[in-house]
Image (cartoon, rainbow, N blue to C red):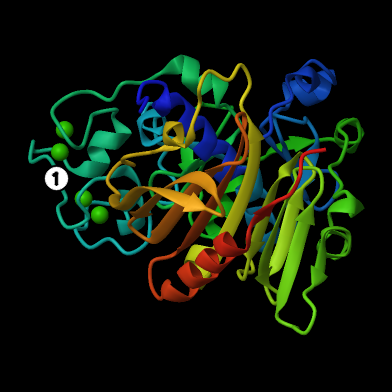
Amino acid sequence: MKKNKKLLISITLIITSLCFIFFDNKLLAQHTISSELKGKILLQVEEHGEAWYVYPYDLKKYYLGKPKDAFDIMRNLGIGISNNDIKQIPIAEANFIGKDDDNDGLSNEIEDSIGTDKNNSDSDNDGYNDKTEILNNHNPLNNKSLTINTELQKKLSGLILMQIEQNGEAWYVNPGNLKRYYLGKPLDAFNLMRNLGLGITNKNIAKIEEYKINQEYTTENIIKKFTNLINNSDNIRKYTDSSYNFNFDYPNDWKIKKYENQPYITQITDSERDYIIEKKGVISLNYFKIQNNTNTNVDTFRVASKGKSTVLSDEEKNINNKEAYENSYEHLLAYEKTTTIQIDSDEFIQITLATAKHNNDYYINIYDNLLRSIQFTAQQ
Ligand SMILES: [Ca+2]
Ligand SMILES: [Ca+2]
Ligand SMILES: [Ca+2]
Ligand SMILES: [Ca+2]
């Protein structure tokens, strides 16, 4: 079993499979005004203060209408980041309020995110409280300074970061000062984004292309194009993807989504917006090919540990006569199970269930049924 190149590959995969990242560097060279404003929040001061976000990867403007829309956009455009990377970006004093059991000025939620003790105002007992330490670039968990990585700050400027190794907490890296701002709940995030917004004239905002959802990718179209109800059943739907030669069954009352920028990812969910808050579940299927394949096998995708999360299972499997590797984890507020199946020498599919920790038998059952139903059809 080859354990060497695992880390890099697994981190790349977590990011692509859970967080829908899309890089297209060609686009970055275009549109001067969009480039100058990339990653910023703009407020239409000559109108009614409408807020827009210029997404760094496509340089289009996204309308931040109501708090819920704004929050959805930000989470959908968020990219996954490891705990090790995010801690190198300094934290701005924003959205610290909320339930604060130890009265150190950091909400329990923030403390869960950064890993300090929410029942101890001075986690490392060095005489400085947790909030004072993080605002002064001191490590609240030991007596060292925090390592600030300015290159990484610049690289992540204007992006929304999601802590995939923690509880999916979202942060925004403000291009103005390269610090990260905790986004918190939809209304907090909305207010924060508006506070950080810069005024822009109607003439200038008009120069930035607006992102519009591609009608091909509406749920109705995806259902029509890729799925059909199984005979004699009104509660199981079959998804067939002829581009990637696989099909699977899923509950008819779940939503199905695909993303224009990542047609190789299919997602099913019973959640409206946030599976953790709603205590629902999401299953993502990510098809990928390995390039310059050198004996990559399912074990390559084994992620033996994820930060402070508990590993619940770590085993080889056989899924419909294909080799597979499965890991499951208990995160602070979520349960995750990931199965990577080798379809062919260079082709894989990675299926991930993410659900709120409580009452997850129902979701595990749906996940296991989906795995049992998955079929790989002949290559073209
Ligand atoms: Ca606290
Ligand atoms: Ca604390
Ligand atoms: Ca301390
Ligand atoms: Ca300290």
Relative placement, left or right, of 251 versus 50 is left
Q: Amino acid at mark 1?
A: Asp
Q: Nearer the viewer, residue 97 or 124?
A: 124
Q: Which residue is depicted at the point 84% across and 42% down?
A: 211
Tell me where residue 155 appears, x and y as whole percent. 56, 21
Residue count near mark 1 (Cα–Cα under 10 Å), binned few <14, some 14–19, many ≥20: many
| Residue identifier under label 1 | 122
Tell me where residue 97 appears, x and y as whole percent. 38, 57
Classify the position of ligand 1 by quadrant: top left, top right, bottom left or bottom right: bottom left
- State whether residue 172 is above or below residue 291: below
In this rendering, does residue 279 appear at all? no
Tell me where residue 279 appears, x and y as whole percent. 48, 71
Relative placement, left or right, of 142 versus 148 is left
Relative placement, left or right, of 32 versus 284 is right
- State whether residue 31 is above or below residue 253: above
Q: Quadrant of the C terminus?
A: top right
Q: Nearer the viewer, residue 37 or 86?
A: 86
Quadrant of the rendered image containing residue 200: top right
Tell me where residue 88 appears, x and y as whole percent. 37, 26
**Beta carbon of the mark 1 residue lies under 8 A of ligand 3:** yes
Q: Which residue is depicted at the point 19% across and 50% down?
A: 117
- State whether residue 191 is above or below residue 158: below
